[in-house]
């Protein structure tokens, strides 16, 4: 696969549908490389579905060789069991990226919507319309889980870009940014 710029893999975790979106950034141009969902069989056990999520993320990493990994954080709901399952799905996807040494960043759904549309309460269709405009994509998505994942990847690009440009510096990666900005590291 020919590479021209930085590649970001975005994930919208789920236990029945996991969305994924991959973008490539070459200078000021954002380009969609892939956007789809992994449909997980409801008849399989939770551990089996988690294994499928891990395998799929590893496969995406092998094929697209992303430089960055961004994932949507679970929103806080009232159903504790659903939150636990979603957290596990997120953890498995993160572990797959970390095992390959890819930097991982997590974004809240509100932050993603705000970054893409300027409105943290935007609807899924509004987010998708803005993504179509930004990436010059005309096809309709198979699922909004896929567009949510794509939005996470684009949000991550915007966040990296805004951090880099705030000081007017040019950084090659996060390691370079940290070396040049040691005061931004928080110690626990």
Image (cartoon, rainbow, N blue to C red):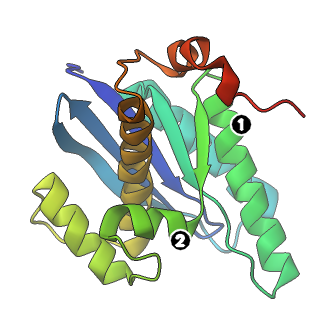
Q: Is residue 155 left or right of residue 117?
A: right
Against 116, is 83 above or below?
Answer: below
Name the residue rendered at 82%, 86% in the picture: 79
Up-down: is 99 above or below 51? above
| Circle number at residue 9 | none
Measured from the top left, where is residue 5 in percent x and y?
25, 23
Which residue in the structure is indicated by mark 1?
95
Element type at marker 1? helix
Q: Nearer the viewer, residue 43 or 123?
A: 123
Query: Residue 49, how many percent across, how many down?
Result: 69, 58
Q: Which residue was labeled with disc 2? A: 110
Residue 176, given in percent of the width and then of the height, sits at 51, 13
Is 165 situated left or right of 106 in this image?
left
Image quarter hosting the C terminus: top right
As displayed, is residue 117 above or below residue 137? below
Residue 45 visible, this angle = no
Q: Position of residue 110 (x, y in %)?
A: 53, 71
Q: In the image, is residue 25 above or below residue 16?
A: above
Ranked by sequence position, the earlier of labels 2 and 1 is 1
Q: Residue furthest bottom?
A: 78
For the residues bearing labels 2 and 1, Cβ distance under 8 angstroms: no
Residue at 38% from the left image edge and 74% from the top image edge: 144
Determine which quarter of the picture holds residue 101.
Answer: top right
Q: Is residue 180 visible?
A: yes
In the image, taking residue 75 as reference, residue 28 lies left or right, namely left
């Amino acid at each position: 696969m020919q590479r021209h710029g930085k590649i970001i893999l975005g994930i919208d975790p789920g236990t029945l549908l996991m969305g994924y979106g991959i973008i490539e950034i070459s200078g000021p141009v954002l380009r969609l490389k892939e956007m789809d969902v992994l449909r997980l069989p409801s008849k399989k056990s939770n551990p089996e579905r988690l294994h499928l999520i891990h395998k799929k993320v590893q496969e995406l990493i092998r094929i697209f060789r992303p430089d960055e990994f961004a994932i949507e954080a679970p929103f806080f709901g009232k159903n504790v069991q659903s939150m636990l399952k979603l957290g596990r799905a997120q953890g498995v996807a993160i572990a797959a990226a970390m095992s390959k040494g890819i930097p991982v960043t997590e974004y809240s759904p509100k932050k993603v919507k705000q970054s893409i549309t300027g409105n943290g309460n935007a609807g899924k269709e509004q987010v998708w319309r803005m993504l179509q405009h930004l990436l010059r994509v005309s096809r309709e998505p198979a699922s909004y889980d896929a567009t949510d994942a794509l939005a996470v990847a684009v949000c991550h690009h915007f966040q990296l870009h805004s951090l880099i440009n705030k000081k007017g510096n040019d950084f090659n990666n996060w390691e370079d940014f940290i070396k040049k900005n040691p005061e931004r590291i928080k110690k626990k």
